[in-house]
């Protein structure tokens, strides 16, 4: 049985995320909190090489929560607890970079409000590729999409 409190936050729109990030920053809970950029996300997901997935050039179904992970059974679709597939952690140790929840990011193109990267629990292997992207409008809410918070390092 999974603990829903450990699921990724999904179903939030870009405007909701931005409000939350402003609160994190203003409250002092996480100074400098912001939406991750595509470049930051891709570097953290892929490492220094040109890999297609965090696992290399293939993504075995057991290593991420994508459509085939639980046999495409309708009753099995849905998010997993964050970190349920540690064998697919990124080279920098990020959990669930592909699969589980599509990550809404600041787009690298100025004419696009945001993009989603990394696939989700209902997406196929092709859409879980680290180079795959889809555009998000500011008001779009999706049960498949969540976000990751970026902030300046506190290490000195």
Image (cartoon, helix red, strand yellow):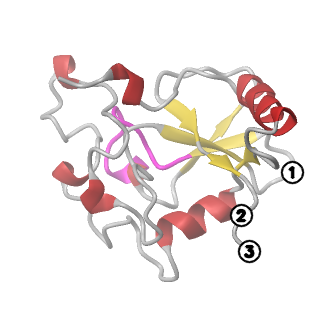
Figure quadrant of the C terminus? bottom right
2 and 1 marks in contact (CB < 8 Å): no
Quadrant in the picture for the N terminus: top left
Q: Which region is colored magenta? A: 117-127
Q: Residue 110 carries which label?
A: 1
Closer to the camera, 19 or 72? Answer: 19
Main SS of the magenta part reads loop
Q: Do the residues labelled 2 and 3 touch (CB within 8 Å)?
A: no
Task: Pick the residue in front: 34 or 23.
Answer: 23
Q: Mark 2 or mark 1: which is in front?
A: 2
Secondary structure under the numbered disc 1 in the rendered image? loop
Tell me which residue sits at (47%, 49%) in the image. 118
In the rendering, which numbered label is found on residue 156? Answer: 3
Q: Which mark is residue 153?
A: 2
Q: Is residue 147 left or right of residue 31?
A: left
State the image quarter where residue 91 is shown.
bottom left
> Looking at the picture, how far across and down is residue 44, in whole percent?
55, 66
């Amino acid at each position: 049985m999974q603990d829903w409190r450990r699921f990724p936050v999904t179903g939030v729109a870009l405007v909701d995320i931005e409000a939350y990030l402003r609160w994190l920053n203003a409250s002092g809970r996480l100074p400098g909190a912001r939406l991750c950029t595509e470049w930051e996300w891709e570097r953290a997901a892929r490492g220094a090489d040109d890999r297609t997935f965090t696992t290399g050039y293939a993504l075995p179904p057991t290593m991420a929560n994508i459509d085939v992970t639980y046999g495409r059974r309708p009753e099995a679709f849905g998010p997993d607890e964050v970190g349920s597939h540690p064998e697919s952690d990124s080279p920098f140790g990020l959990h669930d970079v592909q699969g589980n929840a599509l990550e809404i990011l600041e787009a690298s193109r100025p004419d696009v409000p945001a993009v989603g990267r990394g696939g989700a629990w209902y997406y196929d292997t092709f859409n879980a590729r680290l180079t795959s992207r889809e555009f998000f409008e500011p008001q779009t809410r999706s049960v498949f999409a969540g976000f990751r918070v970026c902030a300046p390092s506190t290490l000195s």
